[in-house]
Amino acid sequence: MNTIYIDSKDGVNKISIVENDRLVEYYREDNSKAKLLGNVYRGRVVNVLQGMEAAFVDIGVGRNAYLFIKDALNKEQLYSNEKYTIDDVVKKGDELIVQVIKEPLENKGPKVTTHISIPGRNMVLTPYSNKVNVSKKIKDKDEIHRLRSLGHRVMKDNMGMIFRTVSNGRSDDILESEYEKLVEIHREIEGERNFLPTPKLIYRELDLIDQIIRDYFNIQTTKIIVNDKEIYQYIIKQHDLLEVDFQNSIKYDSQYDMDYHMNIQIDMKEALSRRVQLPSGGYIVIDETEALTAIDVNTGRYVGTLTLEDTILRTNIEASIEIARQLRLRDIGGIIIIDFIDMKKREFVDIVMGKLEDAFKKDKNKPYVVDITKLSLVEVIRKKNRPTLDTKTTFICPTCNGRGRIRKNEA
């Protein structure tokens, strides 16, 4: 059983997702601060950078948003064999409808795309694609065939969709109704294309609590514990919108305080540490830098009981599972380099890689194993759209500037 804990007080919502008694994701939302990710804006191009094949777009949030050429192509250009430059696609002063796909990070503004997608409970509308895709977590071939057939039958104006895992077993009527609602939202967005003022917010993504329920709640395997009466009542009412009866899956506990939830606090402390212990006695070391994240695996005090190869294999298997959890929990994105303990046998390498990829399947940000280098380093990339847990919950020490070192007294 998985649990979503919602702790709301003093205008701050803290949400923890626990799977098999381990914290796997943590979110913090300050209600006084505007949220950008997923929002759709009508913006104005303020600068075109030919050398970067990108443009800056004013969407009215302070810092200009970054629009890369691939995200600026229209539907015809996107599927054309011709090559385009950024000057062919946008000009200074153009007004565009764009969606935020990455929150502002440190000194960088938000990243945007013109390829709008609208997420729903059971599916994601993808107007820039005419394909019908089904979540890889749905394994039943008959169900996959049913969903694809339904998708092609209800499709309008070549606007495709991605069926989410929760669509498994849902009736055709519910899925068709949701598709039509998402299409209507998209039409309303397109209807704002030529109106003033610019810049302007024209579609706001759901608040964090709504997103978590939409993306993570499963009535068979998930329960919700919340300490705020208004949020509790709001979630109960959501069954009309999502066709889900939350009554038996949600508990109101006014005394709940995440700061005193021992298991969550232990996992949070570990997630903010450089070193993470493994069950056998081995450990991993995680170093986040501006360019990439490096992860090192060590046997530590674990000496095994059979052979050195067996000791290394078991440590690497434990490390692969823990690394997947830590990437999720810390919300680390971009380039990730993993230095597993060297394994001589190819079959052992395949076992560890299989465990790592299986563990990655639980992550909605879709980590991807790119390759194993000649130095046996595993290259991974993971979607990066929010600040990391470390950035959200800590600040850099003004004395050491984040180095974590004390200078020796040479005198």
Image (cartoon, helix red, strand yellow):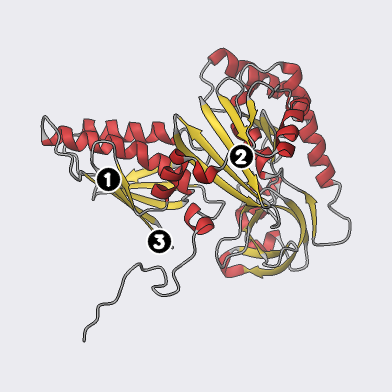
Q: Residue furthest front?
A: 255
Q: Which of the two discs, 3 and 1, labels the residue nearer the N terminus?
A: 1
Question: Residue 33, position in %: x, y?
Answer: 69, 57
For marks 3 and 1, give the CA distance.
20 Å
Determine crowd level at label 1: few under 14, some 14-19, many 20+ residues with C-alpha closer than 10 A. Answer: many
Q: Which of the two discs, 2 and 3, labels the residue nearer the N terminus?
A: 2
331 or 352, nearer to the observer:
331
Q: Nearer the observer, disc 2 or disc 3?
A: 2
For marks 2 and 3, give the CA distance.
31 Å
Which residue is located at x 24 percent, y 36 percent?
A: 280
Left or right, residue 311 beside residue 241:
left
Residue on which the image places disc 2: 6
Q: State the image quarter where residue 402 is shown.
A: bottom left
Dot 1 amino acid type: Tyr
Residue 298 vertical position relative to residue 49 in the rendered view, above or below: above
Callouts 3 and 1 close, C-beta under 8 Å? no
Residue on which the image places disc 1: 283
For marks 2 and 1, give the CA distance.
31 Å
Left or right, residue 345 beside residue 351:
left
Question: Residue 78, position in %: x, y?
Answer: 64, 47
